Amino acid sequence: MNIQLTFDKLAYVDRLKAAGIDERHARAHAEGLDQALREEVATKADIAELRTEMKAGFTEECDIAKVGVAGGRNAIGASSIYDKADLAALTGRIVRSYIVTAIFLVVSTATIVKFVH
C-alpha cells in the first residue's frame, strides 16, 4: 500500500517537548504515531478501491436478483415460493452490505480526519 500522508515528525516532537515531554519520549511517540499512520490508516485510494469493489459486488447481486425475479414470474407453485425466499434472503444481504459500507465509510472518514489534522 502506497500511502501519501503528511506527518511532520519533527514538528510533533517539538510540540511534545514544548508540553514538557522529554525528547527521548517525544521521539518514541512520533515514531510510533508515524508507523501507525502508515500501516493502519485507510487512504482515499484505499476507500475508492473498496467502493469500486463493493459497487461491482452490488451490481452482481442486483443482476442475480433480476434473474430471480424473472424466474419467479415464470415459475408456478412451490418453485415460485422458493424463488421469493431466495430473493428475500438476497435483499437482506444487500441491505446488510449497505449498512456495513455506511459504517465503514463513517469510521474511515473519522479516522482519516482525526489523524491528518
Image (cartoon, rainbow, N blue to C red):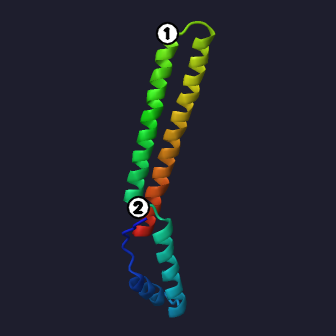
Name the amino acid type tagged 1: Asn
Q: Which residue is mark 2?
A: 43
Nearest the viewer among 117 and 79 is 79
**Looking at the image, which residue is at 38% across and 70% down?**
5
Q: Residue furthest right?
A: 78
Which is more N-terminal, label 1 or label 2? 2
Q: Is residue 44 left or right of residue 20?
A: left
Q: Quadrant of the N terminus?
A: bottom left
Crowd around label 2: few <14 · some 14–19 · many ≥20 (10 Å): some
Are the two marked residues, 2 and 1, in contact with CB atoms closer than 8 angstroms?
no
Which picture quadrant has residue 77?
top right
Compared to residue 73, the image places residue 94 above or below, namely below
**Looking at the image, which residue is at 52% across and 89% down?**
21
Q: Quadrant of the C terminus?
A: bottom left
CA separation, marks 2 and 1? 47 Å
**Looking at the image, which residue is at 53% across and 85% down?**
28
Q: Position of residue 45 (x, y in %)?
A: 37, 58
Q: Position of residue 16 (x, y in %)?
A: 47, 85
Nearest the viewer among 1 and 28 is 1
Crowd around label 1: few <14 · some 14–19 · many ≥20 (10 Å): few
**Looking at the image, which residue is at 45% across and 29% down?**
62
Nearest the viewer among 75 and 17 is 75
Nearest-to-viewer mark from 2 and 1: 1
Q: Position of residue 96 (x, y in %)?
A: 55, 38
Q: Residue 25 got which mark?
A: none
Q: Residue furthest bottom?
A: 23
Q: Secondary structure at mark 2?
A: loop
Q: Residue 74 got which mark?
A: 1
Which picture quadrant has residue 18?
bottom left
Name the amino acid type tagged 2: Thr
Nearest the viewer among 100 and 55 is 55
Compared to residue 91, the image places residue 25 above or below, namely below
